[in-house]
Image: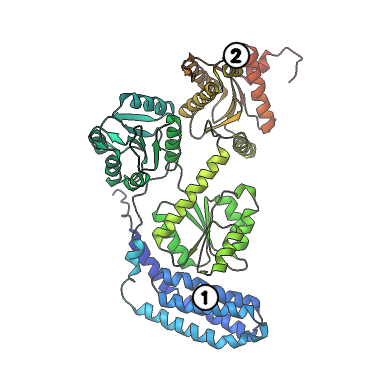
Amino acid sequence: MSADVSPPARSWEDEFHDLVEEFVRSGDERLAEFDQTLRELADHPADAHALAELRRHFHRLVGAGATYGFAGLSDIARAGEDLCRRAAQGVAAERQAFLPEWMVLVDRLRAGFSAAAEAAGTPAPVQEAAAGLSRDQPEPGNRPPYNILVVDSDPSVRAVLQRLLVQEGMAVRLVATGAAARDSFDEALPDGLIVDLDLADGKGYGVVEALRARPGGDVPAVLIFSLTNEFLDQTDAVHAGADACFEKPLDWEVLVRKLYHLLERTSVQAPRILLVEDDPDHAGFVRASLGSAGYDVRVCDAPRQFKEMLAAFRPDLILMDIVLPDVSGYDLARFVRQDDQYVTLPIVFLTGEAQVQARIQTVKAGGDDHLVKPVHPSLLVSSVAARLERARFLKTLLNRDGLTRLLTHTSFMEHAQAVVAQKQRHEPDPAALVMIDIDHFKTINDTFGHQAGDRVLVALSSLLRRHLRRSDIVGRYGGEEFGVLLDRLYEDEAVRLMQRLLLEFAEVEQRAPAGQTFRVTFSAGVAMFDPLTMDLERWIQAADTALYAAKRAGRNRIVAHSEWLGSLRPGVTI
């Protein structure tokens, strides 16, 4: 039996060529829609719905025509849409006066489609539209641990960065010169690069440029810094390809946090884009453009399905037209903005509406950007990427604790509630909730200062991030208390895991700002979820009860809720 052979990947140019041909073939169907709507307006000039349909037919062609290289068709359609706008603003009884002009425009469209069908080859804009789109996008998914290359001539700086990066669970390579860094690139490109401006054999800019010049070199996160008095030119750094720049006085922990933020951009699944567009030709263009850049695009061609698709698909960005059947894009944007859960969800309008008034309405409706058809694929991809990055950063600010970068209390509770709902519906797999509290935390603050206390919190959060799965839910529950939700682990497995973390954390040498060193322990309570008797509140109460039992028993230990239940005397209830 012969082995299966996967077909070769098609280029974006090939996909675009097919879309152009499909657009040309759609001419007969589009013209039939125009003819039908004009007949309805001839019989019923005051029919507002028929006028809106006619405008929508013209509007769809404005964007699609120019997008696929038929600017003449687009110009004709734009004139028709302008006539529709004028007719809507006038008296209904006078709309019949516009019919001859509309009919002339439709006849011109008919001739234009006929000429396009007879023309051989692909319109010139295909090659132009393909420019700027890279097929070499990173595959979505997680690739922990991150591989970081540190390039610095100072061994003490390399040691500091190595300690902080390893504490974050990253794999670190250390080199002292630009030449060694370039040799390292030959072996494997790093996920992140931290480079000093002044190296023994040249400037750090050259190292960054060498990385960016490699195939796939546009993916790694790059930070450049300077500890000397030499000015670090932001323009030169950005031109070389650095994502962020730091000058003295330099906070190493801030630098590492910035690196972590940049790395997270490439470790998530493909961003989900919900496209609200009733024109299949333009929808195909957007899907091909964004799909080539690694986005997961879902098309909603009927506004009545929008609410259901929004809830089911959970997009990271909405891309929508303004003129839609029965409802406008503005109305859908206002609907989205009424729900607090979508406060950070970007909404980008992609439309043929170029007037200033349309842009004003975009802002009023809660839109984040307004792109006018035809849009160059590279501009579309860049605009979407920029809006997604800003939204991700805002969500991080809202959902992540600024000190530990773990989930906030509110976000942790939302994630935990989702797990509870899932377990109560149909999932029999076990789930353990762990409540962790740092022992004698007030004494640490009183003795060594609050900065030392903050370092302890960061050390524990780093430990949890390093040794727990990405699927596990970890949050700063409040103060020095942390919450961990371990799905698909039984009680003995959860207790054993927490015991190992407890022993490792107790061996970490904590350091106060004044130089003193000390060690810290924690206590934890573990409770398994029972879908028959528990909701989220009872589950947390059970874990808290086990935690307080651990503290009463002397701290620095793990207690399971079942163990606490077994210790109760007969007749004692919870």
Q: Does any portion of residue 323 appear in the rendered image?
A: no
Q: Residue at x 32, y 46 (%)?
A: 240
User: Marks 1 and 2: in contact by CB < 8 Å?
Assistant: no
Colour scheme in the image? rainbow
Q: Position of residue 556 (x, y in %)?
A: 56, 14
Q: Is residue 420 above or below residue 440?
A: below
Q: In the drawing, does residue 138 fall left or right of residue 563?
A: left
State the residue at coordinates (45%, 73%).
Answer: 26
Residue 339 x, y percent position in the rendering: 64, 51
Mark 2 neighbour class, 10 Å CA radius: few under 14, some 14 to 19, many 20 or more: many
Image height of 539 relative to 562, above or below: below
Residue under pointer 2: 555
> How many residues crowd around disc 1 within 10 Å: few (fewer than 14), some, or many (20 or more)?
many
From the viewer's perspective, tell me whether residue 360 is left or right of residue 574: left
**Going from the N terminus, do you reach mark 2 or mark 1 first?**
1
Determine the image quadrant of residue 415: top right
- Residue kind at label 2, given as amino acid type: Arg
| The one of 82 and 472 positioned closer to us in this rendering | 82
- Up the image or down, 40 lies above or below 538; here it is below
Q: At numbered mark 1, what does the secondary structure look like: helix, strand or loop?
A: helix
**Residue closer to the observer: 310 or 395:** 395
Q: How far is disc 2 from disc 1 in space, using C-alphas?
A: 73 Å
Q: Give residue 277's position: percent from left, percent from top.
A: 52, 64
> What mark, if any, has residue 58 been given in the picture?
1
- Residue type, label 1: Phe
Give the x, y percent position of residue 252.
Answer: 42, 30
Seen at 55% across and 40% down, the residue is 397
SS assignment at label 2: loop
For residue 86, say whether it is visible.
yes
Question: In the shown orientation, is residue 388 left or right of residue 188?
Answer: right
